[in-house]
Image (cartoon, rainbow, N blue to C red):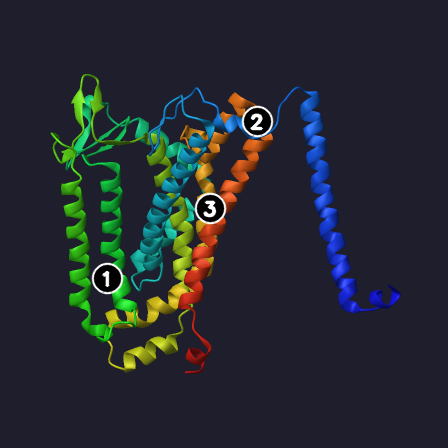
């Protein structure tokens, strides 16, 4: 025994075992004490409540929901609502941040001034204040009788109403996947090395792939059309309210706009930093090869800037995803609000908070893993650095 303890590896292993064992004992003691205190107060613990009916409804859901549905179904709805809001918010924030970031690096003095002013204003106003501001603006829009109309869409104080196709859920989901493929396929075909054709001669293949995917989406929508109904369901005024179409509630719109504007101000600085990180020597070398300014931007400056931006962008995206919890301030039924309502109605505080923590942990770890994979894929390899 004494001889074993003289071995450095054995001592290190024992210390690690003792450390992990102490942590496990601490957690176990906490669980036992919490269960005993809850039992003394007459509060039952466990996850059986997940299968009981909620008895309340939600004001926005991408899935069908009624008051008779169980709690676990509402948790799923909350997670999907959070992912939907986060995805829309991140996409809009990226678009805004890219435009403002490019303006910040422009040679035009006015563009740089506007970009700097945007960042200074919206980065220094708390997000929750911006959420309240946009919510107040949207809820003061005209009533349904005086709605603003454009391309079949109606904008009112009760939300944005969009025309939607009268197709089944499966056909609608398949059509969305086809549209996503129409965007992703040309990008992949332009970068993959599996095609024998040179990179500069793939435009025809890329356009054909995009057109095929869009045609597939159109065929799916036509085949999945519900019988005896028009292909598109347009919103229309009936009585004092609007019927038909897809309603985007004011709560969702306010949150998406606030996240886009607030997050865009931070992403703009990340974009500016990424472009500033590209060395002048590399730009001058590309120009000396006779490349046009556009090809220098797309082939040299943008790829090098993306490598510098991506690790910081991943942190910013994780932060913005957590910012979706602001939805509870304006009544949007995201994951956090579903948990808050569940605590009020069921009293299962520890269990629901545990589900909330586990849910956000899974979402953000998945997001970080995706960006780590992309970062690893586009990173310069050792032989490329030497070249």
Q: Can you give x and y, in whole percent of width and height, for residue 11 in the image?
A: 79, 63
Residue 217 visible? yes
Q: Which residue is mark 3?
A: 363
- Judge from the rendering whether residue 318 lies leftward or rightward of residue 260; answer left or right: right
Sequence-wise first label, 1 or 2:
1
From the viewer's perspective, is residue 137 above or below residue 5? above
Q: CA distance from mark 2 to mark 3?
A: 23 Å
Q: Can you give x and y, in whole percent of width and height, for residue 187 in the image?
A: 27, 62
Closer to the camera, 51 or 178? 51
Q: Residue at position x 20%, y 64% from top? A: 206
Query: Which label is found at residue 186?
Result: 1
Say what secondary structure mark 3 lies in.
helix
Say what secondary structure mark 1 lies in.
helix
Sequence-wise first label, 1 or 3:
1
Residue 132, image quadrant: top left
- Mark 1 or mark 2, whichever is nearer to me: 2
Q: Which residue is mark 2?
A: 348
């Amino acid at each position: 025994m004494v001889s074993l303890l003289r071995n450095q590896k054995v001592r290190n292993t024992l210390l690690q075992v003792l450390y992990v064992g102490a942590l496990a004992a601490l957690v176990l003691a906490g669980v036992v004490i919490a269960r005993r205190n809850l039992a003394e107060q007459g509060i039952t613990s466990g996850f059986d409540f997940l299968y009981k009916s909620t008895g309340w409804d939600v004001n926005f859901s991408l899935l069908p929901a009624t008051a008779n549905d169980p709690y676990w179904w509402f948790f799923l709805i909350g997670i999907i609502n959070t992912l939907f809001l986060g995805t829309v918010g991140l996409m809009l924030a990226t678009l805004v941040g890219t435009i403002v970031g490019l303006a910040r690096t422009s040679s035009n003095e006015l563009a740089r001034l506007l970009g700097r002013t945007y960042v200074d204003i919206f980065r220094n106003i708390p997000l929750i204040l911006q959420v309240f501001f946009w919510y107040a603006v949207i809820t003061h829009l005209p009533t349904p009788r005086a709605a603003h109309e454009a391309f079949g869409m109606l904008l009112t104080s009760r939300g944005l109403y969009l025309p939607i196709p009268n197709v089944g859920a499966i056909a609608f989901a398949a059509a969305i996947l086809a549209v996503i493929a129409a965007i992703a396929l040309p990008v992949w075909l332009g970068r993959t090395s599996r095609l024998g054709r040179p990179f500069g001669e793939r435009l025809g293949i890329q356009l054909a792939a995009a057109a095929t995917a869009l045609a597939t989406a159109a065929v799916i929508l036509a085949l999945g059309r519900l019988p005896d109904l028009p292909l598109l369901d347009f919103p229309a005024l009936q009585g004092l309210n609007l019927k038909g179409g897809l309603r985007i509630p004011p709560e969702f719109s306010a949150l998406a706009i606030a996240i886009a504007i607030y997050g865009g101000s931070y992403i703009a600085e990340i974009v500016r930093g990424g472009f500033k990180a590209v060395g002048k020597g590399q730009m001058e070398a590309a120009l000396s090869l006779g490349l046009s300014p556009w090809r220098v931007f797309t082939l040299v400056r943008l790829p090098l800037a993306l490598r510098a931006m991506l690790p910081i962008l991943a942190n910013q995206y994780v932060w913005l995803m957590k910012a979706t919890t602001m939805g509870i301030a304006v009544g949007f039924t995201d994951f956090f609000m579903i948990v808050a309502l569940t605590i009020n109605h069921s009293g299962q505080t520890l269990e629901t908070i545990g589900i909330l923590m586990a849910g956000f942990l899974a979402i953000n770890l998945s997001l970080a893993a995706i960006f780590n994979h992309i970062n690893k894929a586009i990173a310069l390899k050792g032989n490329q650095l030497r070249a």
